[in-house]
Amino acid sequence: MQMWFEAFQFAKDPYEKLDPYKIDLERLVWDRLDLKKAKEDVDKFIEDTVGKQRIALKIFGSAGSGKTWLTRIIQKELSEKFAPKKEEMVFLYTKVPRMEPVFQVVYRIAIDYFLTNYFEKLSKFTSGTDLGAWEKVIGDHDLALCFSNFSSGTPTKKALARKWLTGDKLSASELSDLELTYSLDSDYERFEMLRKLIEKLLNKFSVCVLVVDELENAPTKLAGQISDGLRDLLDLFSERFALIASFTAQKMEEWYDLGYTEALGRRFDYTIELSSLDIDTLPEFLRIHHKAYRKESAKVKDEIFPFTEDTAKKLLELMSPQYHYPGYFLPNCKDIARLASSKREQIDAKFVEANFPKVSFK
C-alpha cells in the first residue's frame, strides 16, 4: 500500500515530527538560510572543535525553533570533518527531561547515549575483553571492571554493569557479582564518574563534545548544580573538549531567570539565537528540506512541490506568529499535503485557505 507522501515522490515523510536524534543523518541539512549569523557562529564553533580547542556554545530560541535539530546538525558536520583525518570524536548527548528533572536522570541519559553509540568503538582499542585488557585502555580499575563485565560478562552481568554505570543503586550481592564495592548513588559520585569518563575517553578519542539540552526544564536548585558542574568541566579540560548548552527562551537574559549562573555564562564563546522563519527565505527553506527526503528517482520541476512559493508563504501568513517556527510550520505542511495527496497535484492558495481550519497549529 502506497503511503500518502509517495504521491509527491518522497522516500519518507518529510514533515514527520521526530526527535532529531532519531532522524537519519543524510536527511539532516542546514536549511535556515535566514540565520546567517547563526551559521557563521556554527562554522566557527566546528572549526574550533576540529582544531581541538576547549570551546562552548549556547543555543536558545522559542519552542519549535530547532535547537535540538541544530545540535544534531553540528554532530553531523563534525563527523564529516573528522572522517578524512581518520580521527574519532565522542559526542555525548543528554537533556533535562520535563517529567523527571533530576541530575540522576540527566547523567543516565548521557551514559546510555555513550553505551549505545560509542562503547563498541571504544572496545576496538582493547586486545581482549578481560579486566587486564580494559585496564590498559582505561587506566582506572573500577571503570575497567565495569567495562569488562559489560563486554564479556553474562547477560546478567552486562545488565548489572549498565545499572552500576548509569548510577542506579545496587544491592550488596549485585555489587559482589561485579566485584565492585560501591554504587554511584549520590549526584556528586555521578558527576565525578562523568568527569572521569570524559577524561578517559580523551585518551582514545580526539575530541569529546558534551550536549546538555532542554535546560529550561531544570528546577532552580538543579540549574545551580548543572551550572557548577559544567563550569568545572570547562575549567578542567583546557583542550579537546566542547560543550553545547541548549534552552528554550525568547531572550538570552532568561538564562539567569532559569537559575543558571554568570560564572558559567561568561565561559561560553558563542551564543546562537534561533529566530522565527523569515517569509522571504521560506521557499528555499522548504526546497532544501524537501530535497533531503525526495526519492532519488523523483522527477519534479521544483523541489518545493507539492507547494509553490506563494502557497508556502500563504500557509505561514495564516498561522499565528507564535507558531512561525519549523517545529510548527512543517506539521502544518503535512496536514495540508496529506489532504491534497489523493489528487497528486500542486497545492494552490485556495486549497490552503479552505483547509487551514484542519491544520494542527493555527
Image (cartoon, rainbow, N blue to C red):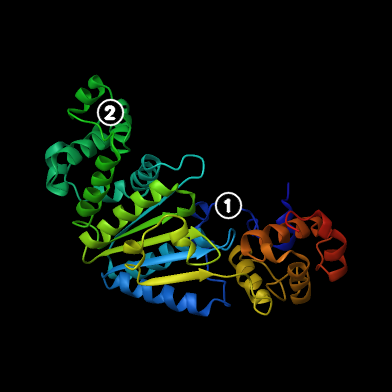
Q: Amino acid at mark 2?
A: Lys
Label number found at residue 278: none
Residue pictured at 85% horizontal, 65% vertical: 353
The residue wearing badge 1 is: 18
Q: Amino acid at mark 1?
A: Leu
Residue pictured at 29% horizontal, 51% vertical: 121
Q: Secondary structure at mark 2?
A: helix
**Where residue 178 sits in the image (x, y, percent)?**
21, 28
The quadrant in which residue 269 appears is: bottom left
State the residue in front, 133 or 317: 317
Q: CA distance from mark 2 to mark 1?
A: 33 Å
Vertical placement of 264 versus 122: above or below?
below
Label number found at residue 157: 2
Q: Earlier in the sequence, mark 2 or mark 1?
A: 1
**Where residue 264 sits in the image (x, y, percent)?**
33, 62
Q: Secondary structure at mark 1?
A: loop
Q: In the shown orientation, is residue 43 left or right of residue 329?
A: left
Vertical placement of 35 versus 242: above or below?
below
The quadrant in which residue 347 appears is: bottom right
Vertical placement of 270 versus 259: above or below?
below
Residue pictured at 28% horizontal, 46% vertical: 191
**Where residue 14 sits in the image (x, y, percent)?**
64, 59
Q: Is residue 285 visible from the viewing direction of this image?
A: yes
Q: Residues within 10 Å of mark 2 (few under 14, many from 20)?
A: some
Q: In the shown orientation, is residue 292 left or right of residue 229?
A: right
- The quadrant of the rendering that contains the C terminus is bottom right
Mark nearest the camera among 2 and 1 is: 1
State the residue in front, 66 or 222: 222
Q: In the shown orientation, is residue 213 left or right of residue 288?
A: left
Q: In the shown orientation, is residue 63 left or right of residue 206?
A: right
